Image (cartoon, helix red, strand yellow):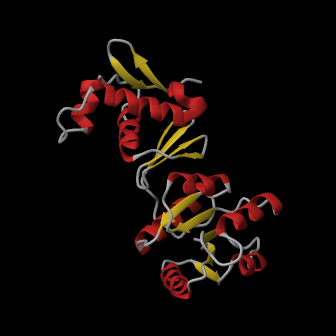
Amino acid sequence: MEKGKILIVDDEADICEILQFNLENAGFNVDCASSAEEALKKLSSGHSLILLDVMMDGMSGFRMAEVVRKERGSQIPIIFLTAKNAENDLLTGFSAGGDDYIGKPFSIHEVIARVKAVLKRAGGPSSAEPAENDIVSGRIRIDISRKMVYAAESPVLLSKKEFEILYLLASHEGRVYSREDIINELWKDAPYVLDRTVDVHIARIRGKLGEYKNYLTNRSGYGYCFSPVE
């Protein structure tokens, strides 16, 4: 199988070295750059993916991603490496054109798995074994292994409990779950959870799904159901 060529961009030499060593052992070809400016000079059509640190001296990773996407018009997959995990920072990364993010400190196994998954989604080369099957329903895709949700391939940032609720409903498409059912499934060790708690989480999920919010419906008197509406 053709192997992907990855460009690692990080101003910490030891991180570049660790990533390069392990990704090459996983079967990828790897280039490294210690700054966004150097990376933009090295980046070519031969690269399949960019692993991009967010916080660097000079041009930031977010800015480099904007240059790659908007000024160069490239759709090469970008995975951000970031010590930041606040929702606003993640949204900034996705709006800049990022396909995924990995928080520091990271597990090498996680990095390799994420790289393989993003390359697979992009239809690019990968030396990976097939990832776990996603749940795909209508325009919603749930990546089980990475605990990520995509609406029309745009990332939807859900909290852990929001993800669990959506996964529960989507994995049993068309089945109606009462509030009590959902609480019994997902709050087993938390007494005194109110029906209202479920309603609030559902409302937040629907808000984040945007134009696909009607995939989650409320069957009055019965409960909630996931059913794609086109």
Residue 62 in picture, x, y percent from top left: 66, 64
Viewer-side residue, 51 vs 133: 51
Q: Quadrant of the N terminus?
A: bottom right
Residue 126 in picture, x, y percent from top left: 56, 67
Residue 144 in picture, x, y percent from top left: 41, 50
Left or right relative to 15: residue 66: right
Image: 226 above or below 42: above
- Is residue 228 visible in this depiction of the protein? no
Left or right relative to 6: residue 223: left
Q: Quadrant of residue 76?
A: bottom right
Image: 34 above or below 198: below
Q: Residue at x 51, y 78 (%)?
A: 23
Which residue extends farthest right? 71
Exactly how many numbered labels are in the figure? Answer: 0
Viewer-side residue, 80 vs 7: 80
Q: Quadrant of the C terminus?
A: top right
Residue 120 in picture, x, y percent from top left: 56, 59
- Is residue 142 visible in this depiction of the protein? yes
Q: Residue at x 53, y 70 (%)?
A: 127
Viewer-side residue, 132 vs 59: 59
Q: Quadrant of residue 168?
A: top left
